[in-house]
Image: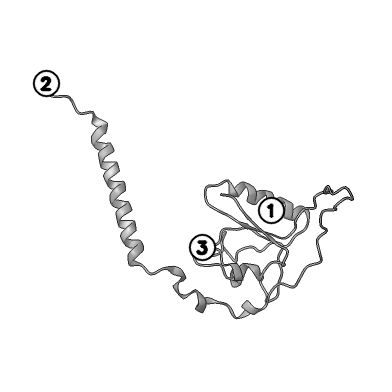
Amino acid sequence: MLPPQKKPWESMAKGLVLGALFTSFLLLVYSYAVPPLHAGLASTRTPEAAASCSPPALEPEAVIRANGSAGECQPRRNIVFLKTHKTASSTLLNILFRFGQKHRLKFAFPNGRNDFDYPTFFARSLVRDYRPGACFNIICNHMRFHYDEVRGLVPPNAIFITVL
């Protein structure tokens, strides 16, 4: 009786699995060997961190009728969109771009790149044409989120949204 023949793709599949495991192991070792990027975050604060966005004119709230039902919704015009990878966030990003253009809103765009110097933490100095006290309506490009820095660029009534 002849020994069973080995299929030609089996050895290649084993090699790929072993290669993936080895690469994962090396990435794990590397992640423990390299200090975290945010270790010195407190020292990277920009001097204009104290200057924050001035309050906007109040947005109209939904009208509450006498019978208790809500009236028409009003669009929010101050939006921080936290863009995440591989969640169709680019589609929502394009919708926000069109909404902002239609309503003539002010965008906080990155200074020279298509992201805010990812993977470093977001800083106001990374925004194109930023001046201390400047206020923006929409922030929606890739960034590594830093609440205090982002909060200082948008009015107090801004909403923060993402897609998971």
Mark 3: which amino acid? Tyr
**Disc 3 vs disc 2: which is toward the camera?**
2
* Sequence-wise first label, 3 or 2: 2
* Sequence-wise first label, 2 or 1: 2
Q: Mark 3 touching mark 2, by CB under 8 A?
A: no
Is residue 141 toward the left or the right of residue 35 in the image? right
Q: Mark 2 touching mark 1, by CB under 8 A?
A: no
Q: Residue at label 2? A: 2
Report which quarter residue 30 is drawn in: bottom left
Residue 45 seen in the figure? yes
Rendered location of residue 12, percent (x, y): 26, 37
Q: Residue at label 3? A: 118
Rendered location of residue 85, percent (x, y): 52, 51
Q: CA distance from mark 1 to mark 3?
A: 20 Å
User: Badge 1: few (under 14), some or many (20 or more) residues near its Cα, within 10 Å?
Assistant: some
* Sequence-wise first label, 1 or 3: 1
Report which quarter residue 128 is drawn in: bottom right
Taking the view exactly as shown, the residue that stands out farthest to the top is 1
Above or below, 140 relative to 123: above
Report which quarter residue 36 is drawn in: bottom left
Q: Which mark is residue 97?
A: 1
Mark 2: which amino acid? Leu
Taking the view exactly as shown, the residue that stands out farthest to the bottom is 47
User: Badge 2: few (under 14), some or many (20 or more) residues near its Cα, within 10 Å?
Assistant: few
Is residue 157 toward the left or the right of residue 70 in the image? left
Rendered location of residue 154, percent (x, y): 69, 66
User: Badge 3: few (under 14), some or many (20 or more) residues near its Cα, within 10 Å?
Assistant: few
Q: Closest to the observer: 38 or 70? A: 70
